[in-house]
Amino acid sequence: MMTTNTTARIPGLALLALLALAAGSTAAVAAEVAQYGNTPSRNMVSAEKNVPEEWDPKTGLNIKWSMDLGSQSYAGPVVSGGKVYVGTNNERQYNPALKGDRGNVIAFDEQTGKFLWQSAHPKLPAGRVNDWPLQGVCSTPAVEGDRLYYVSNRAEVICADTEGFRDGENVLHGSWSNPSYGVIQGKPQVFFPGGDGWLYAFEPRTGKLIWKFNL
């Protein structure tokens, strides 16, 4: 199985299509594509064998499933841990409560194409000077373990849980606390009271968790 790094146009929307291996293929299970360019070398050459030479989203030829995205999608899809992640805008409105122009990262189930969750970022108030209309999230996500990294339309580096809010670990109500720095028994630490109700201590140079306490 492989994914395209391009989008096909359907009425008013971009299309994410997952290509399936042709019937009778002897190819092994496809490797995950967890970042732009497959590996840090950004070598776009695929090691897959017996992949389809033809596909058609309209007829379903060699298409495993397809899902509508926003009207523009510049961030190519990545596949990791049974999920497909892609950046787009908010024109598809998977959550009708989140209206207007936004930058979205959407997660789909790799096997079925089912919508799982999305992260929808409001536009910067400065407008097109800093956040051009309808561009959405243009950063192709990168996955490592259970963390999803991307740059939002608000010029923020985001490290998100790959389960989104589906695993029940939500910010409880809000997050107003700031991180602080201290040295305890000669060990430098960064303390962060998280919106999930836990107090964390991290190693300043590496970000490695030292301890956490349930508040």
Image (cartoon, rainbow, N blue to C red):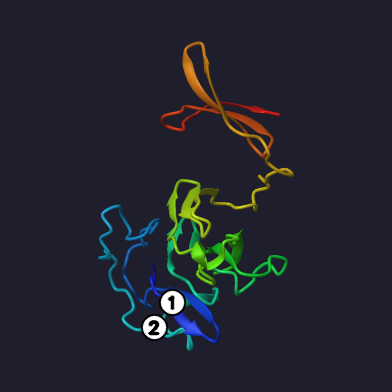
Q: In the rendered structure, which amino acid carries the disc numbered 2?
A: Trp
Asked if 84 appears above or below 68 in the picture, the reply is above
Judging from the image, what secondary structure is the residue with disc 2 in? loop
212 relative position to 73: left or right: right
Judging from the image, what secondary structure is the residue with disc 1 in? loop
Q: Residue 179 falls in which quadrant of the image?
A: top right
Asked if 119 appears above or below 167 in the picture, the reply is below
Q: Residue 142 falls in which quadrant of the image?
A: bottom left
Asked if 194 appears above or below 11 in the picture, the reply is above
In three-dimensional space, the C-alpha distance between marks 1 and 2, rounded to whole angstroms, equals 13 Å
Q: Residue 119 falls in which quadrant of the image?
A: bottom right
Reading the image, the residue beneath label 2 is 55
42 relative position to 173: left or right: left
Reading the image, the residue beneath label 1 is 7
33 or 6: nearer the eye? 6
- The residue at the point 32 percent across, 60 percent down is 37
